[in-house]
Amino acid sequence: MIDTTVFQNKTAVYYTLGCKLNFSETSTIGKILREAGVRTARKGEKADICVVNTCSVTEMADKKCRQAIHRLVKQHPGAFVVVTGCYAQLKPGDVAKIKGVDVVLGAEQKGDLLQYLGDLHKHEEGEAFTTTTKDIRSFSPSCSRGDRTRFFLKVQDGCDYFCSYCTIPFARGRSRNGTVASMVEQARQAAAEGGKEIVLTGVNIGDFGKTTGETFFDLVKALDQVEGIERYRISSIEPNLLTDEIIEFVSRSRRFMPHFHIPLQSGCDEVLKLMRRRYDTALFASKVKKIKEVMPDAFIGVDVIVGTRGETEEYFEQAYQFISGLDVTQLHVFSYSERPGTQALKIDYVVSPEEKHQRSQRLLTLSDEKTRAFYTRHIGQTMQVLMEKSKAGTPMHGFTANYIRVEVENDESLDNQMINVRLGEFNEDMTALKGTILMNYEV
């Protein structure tokens, strides 16, 4: 039994790097500490506890993690510093040596962080508590409210794919999940708390069901029945796991939005083989075609990595031409980063940093063209927008069902409300369409 009296009236700050899954897990850590008596520190207040949830997807991510830890140690002198997340799991010894760090928690430990905090007295040297990758087995549930309107429901963790460039299976362990019933219960709780939109998150969510004998499609169908939740979004799903039955179900669903995020990584089959991806460009193109056949206005986001080992100029040009011809909405472009222990390091051809930058810029320009064309097609239409809270004196923003960002005049009463908006021209920085709010009878 943990004595929580030591936590009463203590304050904490939280810093998260990386993916939506990390943000969801940080929120759950915050909830655990709040229930033990810890409140979130106010702006400018010195905290008693600092929690840093790290990422390690690239070398730059590692660097940002170290910088964040140093900054928090300086801003909150004497605070008890806890570091968790992927960087902590992969490099616990390195993290523990950072001045000011007290406890480093791996993937298996972060859900039980209270038992590692002791009496909150600073350690002379940081202590690391991790489990080897093959022994990471627990699934820590998480359904957390983001800073804005939507909730993030963690449905799956870990990955069995071992792509040649990626360290995530080593950082998070094998694929595992909770039950469909437990996910439904968390969605119902989110609805009871006023949630209208839930984003399904995980490492490889299409792999849901490995540990429970269920499928991701089972989960989608069950969540679709939860009353009170008006919108679900699938955060990211591998193309080989995005089945036609899921696509067709989403097209008929009132609650699952016409919004997909599908990692491509390369538009060249030879590079996909080097990456050890489980599909080819033909399969990817067929998924995009299927989505657009049944949902012509669907938003499709695509992850692309440039400059991976083995990506010659010819291969990149093939990839560029393939992506250019896809009816997708937005590209999330990442420059390849060498990760220790990955199989990609055995590939001879290395792309220079300058060439990586040039390729990234070409794809980012292509992405802007595709996104603006998609937005432009919707100007003049009337659509429902779920509004998000904003700072006083600044415009409010929200998203349509198909993830078009909309800007309207600030009105606090609209926070977390679904409103009817006529879409107008782009705003000044071209990041949203200006909207005119309509009364319900004008739709």
Image (cartoon, rainbow, N blue to C red):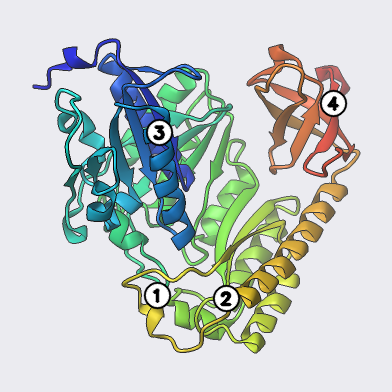
- Which mark's residue is nearer the viewer, 3 or 4? 3
Number of dots carrying numbers: 4
Quick check: 23 left or right of 94? right
The residue that disc 4 covers is 443
Which residue shows up at 77% across the image and 18% down it?
393
CA neighbours of label 4 inside 10 A, class few (<14), some (14 to 19), many (20+): few
Q: Secondary structure at mark 1?
A: loop
3D distance between C-alphas at marks 4 and 2: 48 Å
Q: Which of pointers 1 and 4 lies earlier in the amino acid sequence?
A: 1
User: Residue 203 in the image: x percent, y percent?
Assistant: 40, 53
The residue that disc 1 covers is 164
Look at label 1 and name its amino acid: Ser
User: Residue 255 in the image: x percent, y percent?
Assistant: 58, 36
Q: Which of pointers 3 and 2 lies earlier in the amino acid sequence?
A: 3
User: Residue 124 in the image: x percent, y percent?
Assistant: 17, 37
Q: Which of pointers 4 and 2 lies earlier in the amino acid sequence?
A: 2
Q: Which of pointers 3 and 4 lies earlier in the amino acid sequence?
A: 3
User: Which quarter of the image is occupied by the N terminus?
Assistant: top left
Residue 211's tag is none
The residue that disc 2 covers is 307
The residue that disc 3 covers is 74
Which residue shows up at 72% across the image and 16% down it?
392
* Residue 184 position by quadrant: top left
Question: Is residue 201 at least partly visible in the picture?
Answer: no
Look at label 3 and name its amino acid: Lys
- Which mark's residue is nearer the viewer, 2 or 1? 2
Q: Tags 2 and 1 in contact by the CB under 8 Å rule?
A: no
